[in-house]
Amino acid sequence: MYSVTQNICAALHLGRLIPQEVIDRLEDRHRANLPEFGIDKATVLLEAKCARVRDEIFDLILLIPAFWIVLTILNFDFHNTDSFLLRAILTFSPPIFLAALIETIKVLVINNHLRRKVARSITHAEQPEDGSSVHNVIIFGGFSPFAGYGVDLDGWSFVIDSEKPKNDDDRTHQFEQIELLNCVSEVIRKTLISATITDKIFVDGRRIRSNRMLLPAITASPKVWIDPDVIRAKIGQPDQEALHYRVISIQLADEQMLLTYFLRSTMLGSNLFIESRCFLLPPIKPEFAELVNLPCWHGPQYYCRVYAQKLLGSLLILLGGSIFLLGIVRRSRIWLSERIFGHPEDKRKVRDESYNYGNPKSLRESWGAENWNAYFQMLEKDMAAKTCQYVIVNSIVDFLDAKGIATDDIKERRTQIFNSGLIISGGTVTAEQVAVGSGASVKTKITVPQSAESDGGQHGQRRHHS
């Protein structure tokens, strides 16, 4: 199976993604970059620039038939009606055929590049980003602080009195928040070997203007990595400016998906507050996963079909050279304006006290699919999520029990947390009837079996789930 990086690079070359938009985002110095899980950003940036340069070269070559057809129009004798149609076909056909040939050669070059470099050179050995080595600060720009981690699946939280003993005659033992988190992490590592566990802080991009640790200057690029000792000092602190979370990430489906649990605990007086949220970064969209369908070799018959298709759209193809010229003029104007008057974003930063230095979502999130590509992806997610949730809750209970703290309230909630999915008795629910993600809703009629309807009363009614 090809990696996410390989498929995204193929999408850039095949026109599924616009190279300039990807380049602008990856090289953006004004807003904090987010983790791009499963993606080698350096490789994607290189391939995006390669695709942009190739497109510009072919657009430049297309100026030849474009100027040719313009000169032909200027020199064509429209007043002579003798054999007008035949003369028009013979006169205008050569530049049109040339434009179609140029576009066919471009397809050949793209396929050759994908086959020889992208499909072979980029391998899993390149260690795509997992977000743990380059980010310990997430600066978000939207509602959710967990930008870059995908869809909000579920979450839970509870408060427990840390001074209430398990037995009336006993006393509770004091502990640090890091002890609780380390206990959970140790059990996770033993149970889920592939899990990656890190500490991160999450900061609103609209509230870092005066934070010189994250923003050395108003016009500087925000920092996404700081001293780990500063991160550890945030553990258990109810600081609303920068919240600490223990991040537990599990790569699924050959690194096509990422399941992440965010765990936080803090003391409010004698009350222990524990929060957990679960996010899923889904696989990429099917249209970005075309590399697997690329044959090892395209024969003459294939390129004859491509040439015929390009010939039909040759008049639109000729516009490529003109668009290229307009693009050069536009980029030159922007470059000159920035050198003389400064970048517009830098001016906004100085002028706008609430300038948002964060991004609401990552590129990888925007490339994510809305539906499962295969049933076993959903199954693997369910297995990992339920296992991780089971381990987290039980390890918290065991830790507090060892400290002599009453856990009756948690044990009552534990069953509710474990069974927080959809429970249907006597009915059937399909994958299409379930909405995934926080705030999602589905209105579906679920009809119970005929035997239940014959019982009458509420068991014979149709249930609506929304």
Image: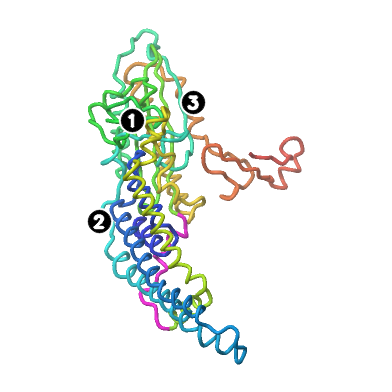
Q: Label for residue 201?
A: 1
Is residue 252 depicted above or below 83 in this figure?
above
Q: Residue at x 39, y 46 (%)?
A: 258
Judging by the rendered image, the residue that carries numbered circle 3 is: 413
Please tell me which residue lies in front, 311 or 42.
311
Q: Nearer the viewer, mark 2 or mark 1?
A: 1
Q: Secondary structure at mark 3?
A: helix
**Is residue 249 rendered magenta in the image?**
no
For residue 180, which quarter of the picture? top left
> Residue 95: x and y, percent?
46, 80
Question: Which image quarter is the C terminus in?
Answer: top right
Q: Residue at x 37, y 20 (%)?
A: 238
Res 100 visible: yes
For the residues marked 3 and 2, what is the alpha-carbon distance in whole angstroms?
A: 43 Å
Q: Residue at x 44, y 83 (%)?
A: 301
Q: Which comes sooner in the sequence, label 3 or label 2?
A: 2
Q: Which comes sooner in the sequence, label 2 or label 1?
A: 2
Res 1 visible: no
Q: Residue at x 42, y 74 (%)?
A: 103
Q: Which segment is the magenta one? A: 285-300
> Residue 36: x and y, percent?
35, 46
Q: Amino acid at mark 3?
A: Arg
Q: Amino acid at mark 2?
A: Ala
Q: Label for residue 160?
A: none
Is residue 119 depicted above or below 261 in this figure?
below
- Left/right placement of residue 431 relative to residue 304 reads right
Q: How many marks?
A: 3
> Residue 39: x and y, percent?
33, 51
- Left/right placement of residue 214 relative to residue 277 reads left
